[in-house]
Image: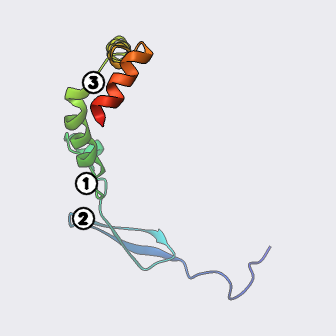
Amino acid sequence: MLMKADIHPKYYSDAKVICACGNTFTAGSTKAEIRVEICAKCHPFFTGEMRFVDTLGRVERFQQKQVVTSGKVVSKKQKKLLKKQQEEAEEAARPKTIREMLERVKAKA
């Protein structure tokens, strides 16, 4: 089966791939030259380094969030206890009788 003429992009079997680290190699592509940020020579998985590869700053933002929330971790039991204490304090602050309600209204006026 033949391909239709003039609808397919030109294929470069010897396209040049250039990495940010300076490494170059050839590959097949529809572009003559390709620029990449990471290749097998500088990627941490292949080099064995412990390094984060992050071009958008996602890792740093995640680490900052972890630092901010590290002191705020509260267990479910602690949350329930705090909620119960708050409810008890609100209940204690409410007037119990009509007389107490009227005294509060007079005090505000």
Q: Amino acid at mark 2?
A: Asn
Q: Residues within 10 Å of mark 2 (few under 14, many from 20)?
A: some
- Whichever of labels 3 and 1 marks the residue nearer the N terminus, that label is 1
Disc 2 and disc 1 in contact, CB within 8 angstroms: yes
**In terms of sequence position, does the residue under pointer 3 or pointer 2 come before the other?**
2
Q: Which residue is mark 1?
A: 41
- Picture layout, residue 58 above or below residue 16: above
In the rendered structure, the answer to whether residue 8 lies left or right of residue 98 reads right
Dot 3: what SS?
Answer: loop
Q: Is residue 4 left or right of residue 69?
A: right
Which dot marks residue 23? 2
Which element type, helix, strand or loop, lies under badge 2?
loop
Q: Which mark is residue 73?
A: 3
Q: Which residue is located at x 26 percent, y 48 percent?
A: 61
Quarter of the image holding residue 79?
top left
* Quadrant occupied by the C terminus: top left
- Where the N terminus falls, by quadrant? bottom right
State the CA–CA distance, disc 2 to disc 1. 7 Å
